[in-house]
Amino acid sequence: MLQRAAPNCGRQPKETMVAFDMESAFRSDLPAAAGEWKPPPDFGFVGGHNDADSIPFAGLAEAAVSALRREGQALATYNLGGSPLGYEPLRQFVADALGTRAAINCDLDEILITSGSLQALDLVNEALLSPGDTVIVEQATYGGMISRLTQRGVNVVGVALDDDGIDPDDLAAVLERLAAEGTTAKYLYTIPTVQNPTGSVLPIERRRRILELAREHEVPIFEDECYADLLWGADRPPALRALDEDNGQVIYCGSFSKSIAPALRVGYLVADPSVIRQLLALKTDAGTGALEQLTLAEFAPTHFDDHVERLTQTLQAKGEAMVDALRHEFGDSVEIVPPQGGIYVWVTFPEGVDTSALVEAAAKVGVEFNPGAGWSADAVDGSRRLRLCFGQPDHDTIRAGVAALAEVVRAETDIGV
Ligand SMILES: Cc1ncc(COP(=O)(O)O)c(C=O)c1O
């Protein structure tokens, strides 16, 4: 079969026909191929992009220059000639910041720098999961994790959330039910501080109760604190990993994607040294990008706190603008719980609305959002919800985009907004 070559990005599509059918050599169980890249729409509320005006590029440039002048020759060696766990000054910064911000007390051999926290998710999944295993997740959770679990043939079980995060009574019920079926979940995946997508923060009493339940049922916890630095609505409670310090039942991950810049692709895992060494054995990329690590290690010790404080204020104002716009356009016909931090608003429509069915009409007026089904353990429950990211658009775009979305909802549903 003749194959048409993929178009060249940014140039005229190549009309060349290639003779060899490469696709017939592919494994039969691959996910669908990636779609063609499209420029962002007018009202792009999808993904986890950040505020462009807040990117500290001047400080990063200075940091990169000074780190390169000092240590540039180390680029001649993989891992800059140092530990494959990551550039030591960066691991030191992560250890210090986690101590101050999340009450995590960790040594450098408990930290593995990863290529974004997505790689952290992949490493943990690779180490722990086989097809047919069960993982407990928050009923609404990170779509990137749900798709990863599904692709591995893992059984995803949701636990109820309320405005304060996981409902411990429901977690107890889920664990009992699984035990009665003879199943021990491979882990509980949770985003306790600035939950994605709900923006909630799990109070300390619930953290303690969840740890108790996890210990009782011998279920590991995978704690994802990707957004925890971007918190404005509450004080940051100690991480589950901090509360479990001497027990070793929690694997923790974090990221510089949301606090500095997603395109840098730098995240980190924190776990006991033996676990970290096992995860390192699965990390086959010969090291996370050295330039990013050098730059962050130079920039962060003196600039991270001030930068994050300013960024958080900017995001809080955008978040409030989005909640105001939603209330203005939709009134009481949707449920919104204002986020306590981060970059998302999770919107719940009345029963009967299927937000996936709105995607096409919304795209026609330049609005993109994440339909709730992909962000929910129970896709049916999630189908009347959607996630909007306010990190990237400015205030005017937020207002105009939410108004355009409301027009679509008016035209496509009978909820009468
Ligand atoms: C909860 C959560 N974890 C992990 C990630 C991955 O982020 P990154 O790989 O950019 O660190 C995201 C991205 O949006 C996320 O929302």
Image: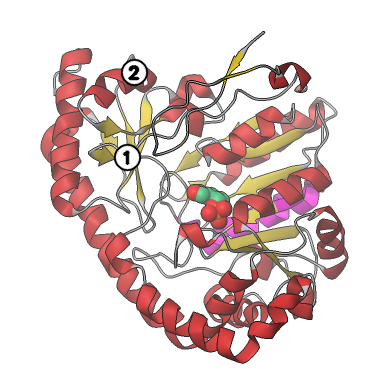
Numbered tag placed on residue 351 in the rendering: 2
Looking at the image, residue 66 lies above or below residue 206: below
From which residue to which does the magenta span run?
A: 201-221
- Seen from the viewer's position, the closer of residues 60 and 187 is 60
Q: Viewed as shown, does residue 155 lie left or right of 279?
A: left
Give coordinates of residue 271: x percent, y percent. 76, 65
The stretch drawn in magenta includes residue 393 = no
- The residue type indicated by label 1 comes to Pro
Q: State the residue at coordinates (22%, 46%).
A: 323
In primary-sequence order, the first of circles 1 and 2 is: 1
For mark 1, what is the residue?
40
Question: Which SS does the magenta portion mostly show?
Answer: helix
Q: From the viewer's perspective, is the residue at label 1 or at label 2 nearer?
A: 1
The secondary structure type at the circle numbered 1 is: loop
Q: CA distance from mark 1 to mark 2?
A: 30 Å
Residue 408 seen in the figure: yes
Q: Viewed as shown, does residue 203 lie left or right of 397?
A: right
Position of the C terminus, as image quadrant, is top left
Sort mark 1 into few (<14), some (14-19) or many (20+) by Cα contacts within 10 Å.
few
- Seen from the viewer's position, the closer of residues 80 and 56 is 80
The secondary structure type at the circle numbered 2 is: loop
- The residue type indicated by label 2 comes to Glu
Q: State the residue at coordinates (68%, 34%).
A: 149
Give coordinates of residue 253: x percent, y percent. 64, 60
